């Protein structure tokens, strides 16, 4: 009898061990963790998303998905299985759609771009155009379809794992329901799932993360589009009302010579990183070579500073009569485009920045001709400034108008710096031991900042290459005609110059340190410019005065004492 009891006990122990092993194999939470890691890795490796964007989606998987799945698992395995399937379908479909968009646009596009494309597709697309799109994008579409299908299969397979794990829990409970030592079956406390959902709720307050939340991504995108459209409509109405008052602007020409004036608006360029200004690396060699080959006159201003450390407030002061003392005057006074058109100029606006929202885009939309080549998010886009060269060449075809203003708005050196060079990389990406690197290490800069400096210097070099090509294109297309080009950057950039940081900075002098130069051919040199103030302090909120001077016009807002091209210029010192 005792032997029988021992055999029964051993059999029971073996069965319990086998059941426990089976139960361990069916634990679904390791599957959840593995799926989250696979989600991020696959998006980055397939090129559906940049690594940092993939990381944001993975964060949502673990925080939002983990919270929802944890609460569902407390209910029962079948509910958890359904939630698991939903998560796989939503996250997988979101990743697949991002892959199609990046395949078509080259980047995650602006909300207005997507909304406009969708509206045009619904209203105007024919069956032939649909077929053409499918054939043209068959690679990204096929890969995205396969990707979504794989995540659907993971969802279906994982749902069975959750259900079987729960069924096994019930079977084991039933087997031991008569054992006195067996405690009643309990489920995990909801503390962790509720904590995860609380964190997820807090993350929704972050606009950048909210744009990556797969359940709300498209609602957020559409809302941003509505806000941008309303803003553009309001700006258009304000500008139309302002244009109607142009007779009061007292715009007049001060000479009759026909001319072409080009305004290059740079982005995030720090003068300290330009070889032309003495930087240890020759980051502007392509531009310097163009200057040398073209001849003419180069005026290099060495003490220019932006008034603001961010694009919109800086350009509102630089391109309108608004100043630090009267920052809201941009609403009431005409901008550069309006003044030039009122003086008889034909204005063209060529841009590698978004053209569907914002005050700056509204200036371009009011030009006589415009071209916007950047269909992605300006920060994340891989659109290169060199892509503006053929656009500029096309704009210059044919006989020039009597008076011509061409504005070229560059993407410049805006982060992410490594995207600014595209296929033709610059020379500094892998430099590890030169004067710049040694100086940064001596200042205690981190490895990430060292790489950021290399990427930024590459972006400067590639930007100089684009500028040189555009100057050559202009000179070839406008021979024998007064041609002047002015370049400035909207603001600077901190990339390890004063601290271990890379990006826009309102705290550091590097956030305001900008390059400013004028190049003129022989014909334009006959026009009066005082070139004796190259070392004088210049603040960009007075740039509109110099632009009026360069265009040969005056208005009621012109003040010679604020015009650094005039002999009457009185330099204003920076505040603080």
Image (cartoon, grey):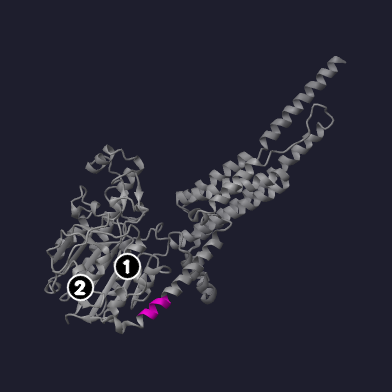
In the image, taking residue 108 as reference, residue 171 lies left or right, namely right
Where does the image place residue 7, in percent across and percent down from the top left? 81, 19
Is 502 a magenta residue? no
Q: Which element carries disc 1, helix, strand or loop?
A: loop
Q: CA distance from mark 1 to mark 2?
A: 21 Å
Query: Where in the figure is residue 423, as x and y percent of width and height?
Result: 34, 55
Q: Earlier in the sequence, mark 1 or mark 2?
A: 1
Name the disc covering residue 326, or none. 1
- Is residue 388 in view from this perspective? no
Labelled disc at residue 551? none
Left or right: where 298 falls relative to 45: left
Which residue range is magenta in the image? 236-242
Most distant residue in the right direction: 1
Residue name at image x 27 percent, y 47 percent: 428
User: In the picture shown, does residue 139 fall above or below 230?
Assistant: above
Q: Position of residue 389 (x, y in %)?
A: 29, 66
Q: Residue at x 35, y 53 (%)?
A: 504
**Count of numbered labels shown in the rendering:** 2
Residue 555 can be seen in this image? yes
């Amino acid at each position: 009898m005792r032997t029988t009891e021992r055999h029964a006990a051993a059999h029971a122990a073996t069965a319990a061990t086998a059941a426990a092993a089976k139960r361990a194999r069916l634990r679904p939470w390791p599957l959840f963790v593995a799926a989250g890691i696979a989600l991020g890795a696959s998006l980055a490796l397939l090129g559906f998303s940049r690594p940092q964007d993939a990381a944001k989606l993975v964060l949502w998987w673990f925080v939002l998905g983990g919270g929802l799945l944890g609460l569902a698992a407390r209910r029962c395995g079948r509910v958890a299985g359904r939630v698991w399937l939903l998560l796989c379908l939503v996250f997988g479909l979101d990743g697949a759609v991002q892959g199609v968009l990046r395949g078509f646009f080259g980047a995650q596009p602006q909300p207005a771009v997507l909304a406009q494309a969708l509206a045009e597709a619904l209203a105007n697309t024919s069956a032939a155009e649909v077929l053409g799109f499918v054939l043209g994008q068959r690679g990204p579409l096929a890969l995205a379809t396969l990707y979504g299908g794989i995540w659907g299969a993971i969802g279906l397979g994982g749902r069975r794992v959750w259900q079987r794990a729960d069924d096994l829990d019930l079977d084991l409970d039933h087997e031991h329901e008569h054992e006195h030592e067996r405690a009643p079956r309990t489920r995990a406390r909801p503390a962790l799932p509720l904590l995860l959902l609380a964190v997820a709720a807090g993350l929704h307050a972050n606009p950048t993360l909210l744009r990556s939340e797969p359940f709300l991504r498209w609602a957020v995108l559409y809302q941003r589009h509505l806000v941008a459209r309303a803003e553009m409509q309001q700006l258009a109405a304000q500008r139309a009302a302002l244009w109607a008052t142009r007779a009061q602007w007292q715009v007049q020409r001060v000479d009759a010579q026909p001319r072409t004036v080009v305004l290059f608006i740079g982005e995030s360029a720090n003068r300290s990183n330009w070889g032309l200004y003495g930087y240890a690396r020759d980051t502007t060699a392509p531009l310097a070579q163009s200057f040398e080959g073209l001849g003419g006159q180069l005026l290099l201003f060495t003490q220019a500073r932006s008034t603001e450390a961010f694009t919109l407030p800086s350009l509102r002061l630089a391109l309108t009569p608004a100043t630090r003392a009267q920052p809201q005057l941009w609403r009431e006074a005409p901008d550069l485009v309006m003044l030039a058109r009122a003086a008889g100029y034909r204005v063209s606006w060529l841009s590698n920045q978004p053209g569907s929202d914002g005050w700056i885009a509204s200036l371009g939309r009011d030009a006589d001709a415009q071209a916007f080549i950047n269909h992605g998010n300006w920060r994340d886009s891989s659109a290169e400034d060199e892509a503006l060269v053929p656009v500029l060449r096309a704009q210059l075809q044919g006989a020039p108008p009597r008076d011509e203003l061409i504005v070229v708005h560059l993407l410049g050196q805006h982060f992410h710096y490594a995207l600014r060079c595209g296929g033709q990389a610059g020379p500094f990406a892998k430099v590890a031991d030169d004067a710049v690197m040694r100086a940064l290490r001596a200042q205690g800069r981190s490895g990430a900042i060292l790489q950021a400096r290399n990427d930024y210097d590459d972006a400067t070099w590639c930007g100089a290459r684009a500028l040189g090509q555009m100057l050559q294109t202009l000179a070839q297309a406008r021979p024998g005609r007064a041609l002047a080009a002015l370049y400035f950057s909207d603001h600077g950039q901190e990339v390890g110059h004063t601290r271990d940081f890379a990006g826009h900075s309102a705290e550091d002098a590097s956030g305001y340190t900008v390059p400013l130069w004028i190049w003129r051919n022989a014909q334009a040199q006959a026009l009066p410019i005082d070139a004796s103030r190259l070392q004088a302090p210049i603040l960009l909120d007075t740039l509109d005065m110099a632009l009026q001077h360069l265009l040969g016009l005056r208005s009621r807002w012109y003040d010679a004492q604020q015009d650094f091209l005039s002999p009457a210029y009185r330099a204003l010192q920076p505040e603080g």
